[in-house]
Image (spheres, helix red, strand yellow):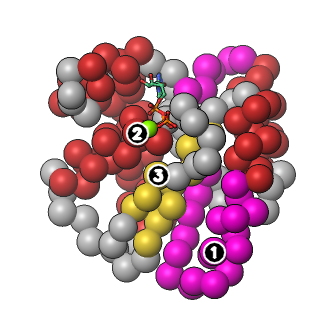
């Protein structure tokens, strides 16, 4: 089983999410059948536009492989902002799965990276850790 965190767009959170997921999978030894793409996208116009283009590539890959699945993960969301709500709406309009849970913007994500830790190791009770745990559960459910 391979989970890849991918997007052509720079700075959307690939490394942050990949390192956190790697730590979580390592602590559990999860086994799943399909390969999975987690596609982080930040709620901004440039990011949405770049991701829409990237999805064309992804969708043609997925059409060729029935053991490849994927979903869009809204990252660095600031709750209560108009742009966050607009981004969520726009993603729903695309013909591509969107993870129900999102990752909010928390400084703990960059602080943990600074320490070379996952957010769960760095601050297990933080909102960032809770976001990762909830998303991780959703990802594992989707992978079954
Ligand atoms: N949910 C989040 N909340 C706060 N900061 C975040 C979050 N996700 C990522 N960041 C920060 O945003 C920056 C970019 O994230 P990251 O390096 O993971 O993106 P990337 O997609 O790997 O970038 P690149 O394309 O340059 O490799 C980093 O400083 C990271 O700490
Ligand atoms: Mg990176």
Q: Of the residues under marks 2 and 3, which one precedes in the sequence?
A: 3
Question: Is residue 68 left or right of 24 when viewed as pictured?
Answer: right
The CA span between labels 2 and 1 is: 22 Å
Looking at the image, in which quadrant does ligand 2 appear?
A: top left
Q: Mark 1 highlights which residue?
A: 61
Residue at 51% of width from left, 61% of height from top? Answer: 37
Q: Is mark 3 within 8 Å of ligand 1?
A: yes
In space, the residues marked 1 and 3 are separated at their CA atoms by 15 Å
Of the pair 74 and 131, the residue shown nearer to us:
74
Q: Quadrant of the N terminus?
A: bottom left
Q: Are marks 2 and 3 in contact (CB under 8 Å)?
A: yes
SS for dot 3: strand
The residue labelled by disc 2 is: 15
Q: Residues within 10 Å of mark 3 (few under 14, many from 20)?
A: many
Residue at coordinates 31% horizontally, 17% vertically from top-left? 111
Tag 2 secondary structure:
helix
Query: Alpha carbon of mark 2 to alpha carbon of mark 3: how far?
Result: 8 Å
Residue 131 to residue 143: above or below = above
Q: Residue at x 41, y 15 (%)?
A: 107
- Total labels: the figure holds 3
Quadrant showing the C terminus? bottom left
- Relative to 70, residue 65 above or below: below
Instruction: Using the rendered image of the protein, determine whether residue 133 is visible from the camera's viewpoint.
Output: no
Instruction: Kindly identify which numbered label has been placed on residue 5.
Output: 3
The answer to whether the residue bearing label 2 lies less than 8 angstroms from the nearest atom of ligand 2 is yes
Q: Earlier in the sequence, mark 2 or mark 1?
A: 2
Q: Which of the 4 image quadrants contains residue 140?
A: bottom left
Contact (CB < 8 A) between labels 1 and 3? Answer: no
Q: Check residue 48 for magenta coloring.
A: no
């Amino acid at each position: 089983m391979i989970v890849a965190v991918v997007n052509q767009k720079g700075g959307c959170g690939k490394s942050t999410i990949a390192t956190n997921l790697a730590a979580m999978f390592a602590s559990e030894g999860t086994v799943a059948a399909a390969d999975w793409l987690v596609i982080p996208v930040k709620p901004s116009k440039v990011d949405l536009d770049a991701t829409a283009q990237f999805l064309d590539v992804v969708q043609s890959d997925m059409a060729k492989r029935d053991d490849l699945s994927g979903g869009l993960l809204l990252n660095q969301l600031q709750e209560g902002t108009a742009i966050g709500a607009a981004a969520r709406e726009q993603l729903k309009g695309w013909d591509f799965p969107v993870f129900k849970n999102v990752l909010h913007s928390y400084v703990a994500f960059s602080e943990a990276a600074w320490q070379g830790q996952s957010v769960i190791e760095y601050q297990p009770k933080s909102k960032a850790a809770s976001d990762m745990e909830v998303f991780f559960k959703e990802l594992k459910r989707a992978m079954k």
